[in-house]
Image (cartoon, helix red, strand yellow):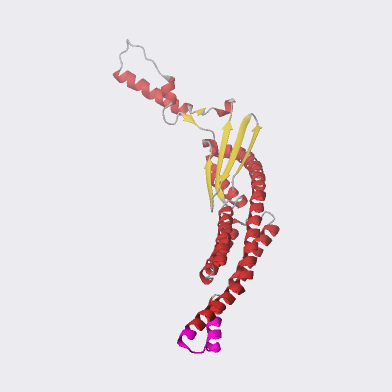
Amino acid sequence: MTGFGDASEQVDGVHYAVELRSVNNRFFKATIRLPDPMAGLEAELEVYLRKRLTRGSVTLVGSLRDPGASAAQTVNEGALLAYLDHLDKMYDRFGKKERTLTIDLTALLALPGVLEPADESELLRRVRPVLLRLVDKAIERLVTMRVTEGAIIARDLRRQAEVIGRKLADIRQRAPEVVEEYHQRLKERVEEMLRRAELSTNQVDLVREVAVYADRSDIAEELSRLAGHIEQMNQMMDEAEGEPAGRTLDFLAQEMLREANTIASKSNDALISRAVVEVKSAIDRIKEQAANIE
């Protein structure tokens, strides 16, 4: 499901901010982008997100802005002096005494080991509780947005279930008529053929043939299972209470489509085939929406 949540906070002069976005995905996929001081928390944040969100492509972006002196890196004086001593020796050996020695401090600061970042473990210790608190707030706002979208999707799912229910009722009413019409057509065809040959019809054989057709085209079991799937879907939406239901709905939709295809293949009737087309259209809509929810 799609959603967005953000949160920000200022602690000890440092401004922290988190943005959380999610889009549809059959599975959970997290993309986390953090500045270097926070990078050590990526694995922990992914586990935390996975516990709270079960589906969707989730992108978390964190930022940290420290306008104070604490943002500056520490100068390793020992390393800097070692470089200067080395330069003095090089100058004594190769330089000309009458020339002035100019030292570029900016270049010296870029040398390996001169600038040292703050203690990473100490920095993570300070950043971690703030970042987790902000992520929690962002998740709550994202979930609120998802709940609103979920209510809209649930109404559409119920409408599709009602469409399927109406069409199943039409098919149940039509199914016995199909057998009776087949009986009449077969009887008329046999009687016509026998009349031309001046023979009499055997009613037992005729009844047996109709019974075979009725058994072969019997769709009562498929109708019952399909109705059961619809009932289970409605019950699941009633009792979900925030529990993830997307994958279960996706599985139910597959089962419903299987039953609808069986009904279509067993029913040699135009009216039933037309009703099945509408049923399959509603099931496709359910599958599409099931992919959009957690």
Question: Measuring 51% from the left and 69% from the top, which residue is drawn there?
Answer: 265
**Most foreground residue, 117 or 291:** 291
Question: Measuring 67% from the left and 46% from the top, which residue is drawn there?
Answer: 148
Q: Quick check: 262 left or right of 143?
A: left
Q: Tell me residue 281's x, y (percent).
A: 56, 57
Q: Tell me residue 276's x, y (percent).
A: 56, 63
Q: Is 109 located above or below residue 290 in the figure?
A: above
**Most foreground residue, 22 or 135:** 22
Asked which quadrant contains residue 92, the reply is top left
In the image, the segment drawn in magenta is 193-211
Q: Tell me residue 244's x, y (percent).
A: 63, 55
Q: Quick check: 23 left or right of 151?
A: left
Q: Tell me residue 39's x, y (percent).
A: 52, 40
Q: Can residue 233 be seen?
A: yes
Question: Measuring 67% from the left and 50% from the top, which residue is drawn there?
Answer: 151
Q: Can residue 218 be seen?
A: no
- Could you tell me what secondary structure mostly forms the magenta stretch? helix
